[in-house]
Amino acid sequence: MPYDRNQPYNALPLLPPPPQNDDDVEILKKLVTTSRALAAANANVKRLPNPYMLINTIALQEAKTSTAIENIFTTEDELYKAVSETIREEQTNVGTKEVLRYREALWQGFDVLQAKERLDMDCVVGIFQRIKQSSAALRPPQSQTVIRRGQSEFRSGEVIYTPPRGAGILEQLMDNLLDYLNDDETYPTDPLLKMCIAHYQFEAIHPFPDGNGRTGRIINLLYLVHKGLLDQPVLYLSKYIIVNKDDYYHHLGGVTQRGSWKPWIMYMLDAVEKTAQLTNQLITSILNQMEATLEHARAEIKWYSKEANEALFSQPYIRPELLGKTLGLTSRTTLTKYFNELVAAKILYPGKDGRAVYYINGDLMSILEG
């Protein structure tokens, strides 16, 4: 039966796809270069001095870009104010809240996966629920969900895809998907190749009412961690997807409409390779700037230490309490003096939001916004 985008795609084939991709020469060559780039990025991640830097810099950038793919936006200023707790949660805009929920969902999934050592349905549903702040789970059988073109697109509102629906259908498809990811004996495919294939399948199943794109991108990162290809889920994958968004959706559609797996797999492998290179550069830039700042600050400020330097690079917006906690200081007078010295040395510059005072690491901001 030919594919009809206006009808539920209940004929979505179970995994694995036809085996010709497993020994395709171009795909195998791309797997080698992608694996090398990913290994280099992972080695560089280990050079960062503390996990907070990952959470508040690279992982936060991934969260921001991933939500932007779904046309949910916030500003760097709003985002970093929220992360540094310069403003209260009720003061943050909707876009910022969505970004922070993505980050929370990523680390919740990471913790669950570490404990269970298996990517299961509870983990996937938990990620979706944290992203959407919802108690919902899989779409109900009667849900008339369709994917339409956006309002800014040509032929806006036109149906471009109707995901599967019906009693037990989503459950069967998701069980198959998770078995494919977890069972390496039955499905002995290279994990990078599995990730590419599984990401298509997840987006084609479209198991939740909303938030499928963000949930799927988190699953990508968690799976790479699960298979030992990353130590932390900090690959900046969404940056590549948003820059190449048209190709992303074109190749997704190619698999659905024509069973054209190879272009999709090559696109996703290129996304991982380029993203690994970008992440590598980002980490190197942060580490080089940390070293330069430490050398400069020690020449200018007597009390400055490696621990203080790491605290100032844990996030772009710094509240005095963060440095006080790092150095064991409780005196407001001493902290004020220290921050005045940091401003005088041009390591930080001050900002204010109402009565809240914070300080900005401009060098770190420049790297993250580059």
Image (cartoon, rainbow, N blue to C red):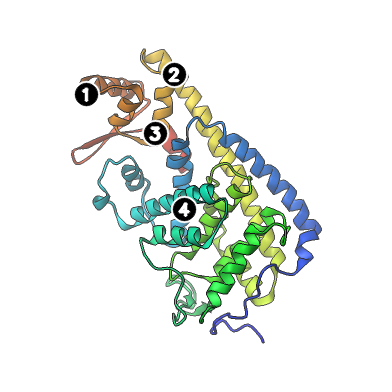
Chain-order first, disc 3 or disc 2: 2
Outermost residue, bottom side: 1
Instruction: State the residue position of label 4.
Output: 65
Nearer mark to the viewer, of 1 and 3: 1
x%, y% of residue 171? 54, 72
Three-letter amino acid code of the residue under disc 1: Arg
Give me the disc on residue 84. none
Instruction: State the residue position of label 3.
Output: 362
x%, y% of residue 359? 31, 32
- Counting other residues with Cα less than 10 Å from the Cα at mark 3, is it few (<14), some (14-19), or many (20 or more)? some
Q: Is residue 118 left or right of residue 210?
A: right
* 120, 303: nearer the viewer: 120
User: Mark 2 and mark 1: span between their CA atoms?
Assistant: 25 Å
User: Mark 4 and mark 1: span between their CA atoms?
Assistant: 37 Å
State which quadrant residue 311 falls in.
top left
Q: Is residue 5 visible?
A: yes
Instruction: State the residue position of label 2.
Output: 296
* 269, 288: nearer the viewer: 269
Q: Residue at x 64, y 77 (%)?
A: 257
Q: Residue at x 43, y 27 (%)?
A: 310
User: Mark 1 and mark 3: span between their CA atoms?
Assistant: 24 Å
